[in-house]
Image (cartoon, rainbow, N blue to C red):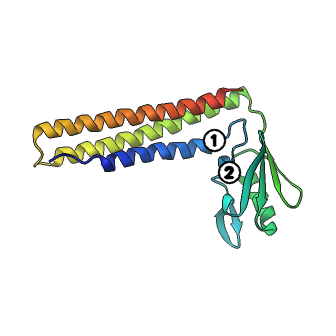
Amino acid sequence: MTFELTDTKNRMHGAQEALQRELGSIRTGRANPRILDRIEVEYYGAMTPLNQVASISVPEARILLITPFDKSVLEEIIRAINMSDLGLNPSSDGNIVRLAIPQMTEEGRKDLAKQVKAEAEKAKVSVRNVRRDAMDSVKKDKEMPEDDVRKAENDIQKLTDDNIKAIDAIAADKEKELLNI
């Protein structure tokens, strides 16, 4: 009997995907619609993600253009952006909202690089937790021969190492993007 790695692979890959989502919402010096992913707008009494009440486009390198599907939600969009932790000042002409992404300072870039490292560490911890669960599952299987247990443990460790390398690469790419002026 051999150990099935599919669930372990999927869970570890999920940690990578979660990291990419988190890093996508970290503001860089360029306009990226994903920085607005966490913003929710009150729409007919319910909190609704911004991208479900408006289209978001990037007409220039440092400008985000938010076009509400329903003009009545324009003020709520502005309020939600102002209340967010993005530190951006929306401007409106009554039909659309413009967000100018300011040039980041060196100190701001370094702070965000630290945040990237912290998010990457969380993802690594998540991968290690998946490894621990898989190792425990292998050790508890009394019917599995010792050689198969050792092979499964080696496979789990290799999978863990590969995922941690991938997480490091994702974080390094984001840091490089942040630190480029």
The quadrant in which the C terminus is found is top right
Local SS, label 1 = loop
Residue at (88, 61) in percent of width and height: 94
Tell me residue 98's x, y (percent).
Answer: 82, 50
Query: Relative to 58, is 166 above or below?
Result: above
Residue that lies at the very extreme toward the right in this rendered image:
93
Tell me residue 47's x, y (percent).
Answer: 65, 66
The picture quadrant where one finds residue 12 is top left
Q: Amino acid at mark 2?
A: Leu
Local SS, label 2 = helix
Numbered badge on residue 36: 2
**Between 77 and 95, the one nearer to me in the picture:** 95
Residue at (38, 41) in percent of width and height: 127
Q: Earlier in the sequence, mark 1 or mark 2?
A: 1
Residue at (45, 34) in percent of width and height: 166
Tell me residue 126's x, y (percent).
Answer: 41, 43
Tell me residue 174's x, y (percent).
Answer: 59, 33
Residue at (25, 42) in percent of width and height: 135
The picture quadrant where one finds residue 95 is bottom right
Instruction: Give the CA distance from mark 1 to mark 2.
Output: 10 Å
10 Å neighbourhood of mark 1: few (<14), some, or many (≥20)? Answer: some
Numbered badge on residue 42: none
Q: Are marks 1 and 2 in contact (CB under 8 Å)?
A: no
58 vs 151, left or right, is right
**Between 48 and 87, the one nearer to me in the picture:** 48
Residue that lies at the very extreme toward the front in this rendered image:
59
10 Å neighbourhood of mark 2: few (<14), some, or many (≥20)? Answer: many
Q: Amino acid at mark 1?
A: Ile
Q: Which residue is mark 1?
A: 26
